[in-house]
Amino acid sequence: MNPKWNGQFSCFDLVAISSEKNTCRTRTVVKVRDLEVGGNDFVVMAGPCAVESESQLLRTAEAVAQAGASILRGGAYKPRSSPYAFQGLGVEGLKILRKAREATGLAIVTEVMSEEDVALIAEYADIMQVGTRSMENFALLEALGGCGRPVLLKRGMTATLEELLRSAQIIAVAGNPEIILCERGIRTFETATRNTLDIAAVPVLKAVSHLPVIVDPSHAAGVRSLVPALSRAAVVVGADGLIVEVHPTPEQALSDGNQSLDFAEFRDMMDDLQPYLNLQQGRRQLRSQLLMSGGGD
Ligand code: PEP
Ligand code: MN
């Protein structure tokens, strides 16, 4: 462990690995229905940026499930940069998500933007998503402490890893240790991509924290052609999963169409990831054998 990281993050004692002695602490495995995020499986969450209609979501749910995703994403409450953009279907969207879960068996991840919506969204969601713009909405983080659902905490687009872990600590102190961290790209001087995927964030977070870490290649890239390459990178650096935007007709999407894959593109990406996943699986098995025999992480 790099001593700089250790000192920097150890104050967040519920989410960080705080000393050499603790490096063998068992990693947090977040259970989502019958899935384990942060365990041996690589968990893919996929679906549209926003729930737009029942047929859009059900078609997408079936396609992503067939391609190997196990969690369906879709925003019913959307944090939009413009007040004139589509703001999401609200409760109607949550009901459509529930239908998709019943139809496909996929678990549901959806965004919560306000502490006032926590109880309602927790009735429908299997994972509560905190978006990049809400990472420091402390009232929301505190309310999620008692929501009874795991939280997917996305890194703020201008947040350091220390600040990300501070937000995770707030949720944990408020009573909820079931947290999944998400690297989704940060703001840099680069303009060729929507955000800059901080790929080093994954191994750093895995070294300093016991929480699962997933990657969102879609919001990092901003353009669909880069999503498969960033997803491969995420697997190779040891991420526990992905959250990917998929839409039946991306060019007609009400939000984030440019970065959404269509069904065939998603299927191809999942197929192409397989050899990399097999390698990662082998490394994980080796690591757990080493840990069981008293070796290092
Ligand atoms: C989203 O997942 O659709 C989203 C708005 O993500 P982020 O908060 O990372 O921008
Ligand atoms: Mn989006």
Image (cartoon, rainbow, N blue to C red):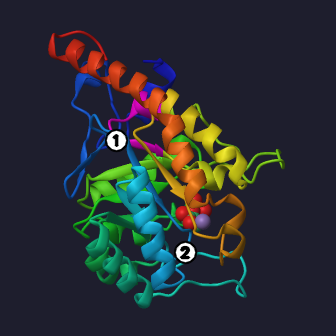
**In this view, the mark in front (1 or 2):** 2
Q: Which of 27 and 12 is in front in this view?
A: 27
Whether ligand 2 has any atom under 8 Å from the Cβ at mark 2 is answered as yes
User: How far across and how far down the image is residue 61, in percent?
Assistant: 42, 67
Which numbered dot is residue 281? none
The quarter of the image that holds ligand 2 is: bottom right
68 relative to 230 in the view: left or right: left
Question: In the image, what residue occupies the spot 26% across and 34% down?
Answer: 27
- Report whether 155 appears left or right of 209: right
| Residue identifier under label 2 | 50
Quadrant of the rendering where the C terminus is positioned: top left
| The label number, if any, that marks residue 211 in the structure image | 1
Secondary structure of residue under mark 1: loop
Q: Nearer the viewer, residue 257 or 75?
A: 257
Asked where in the image residue 22 lies, by quadrant, the reply is: top left
Write the residue at 59% across / 48% down. 217
Q: Give the range drawn in magenta.
A: 203-214
Establish if 288 lies above or below 52.
above
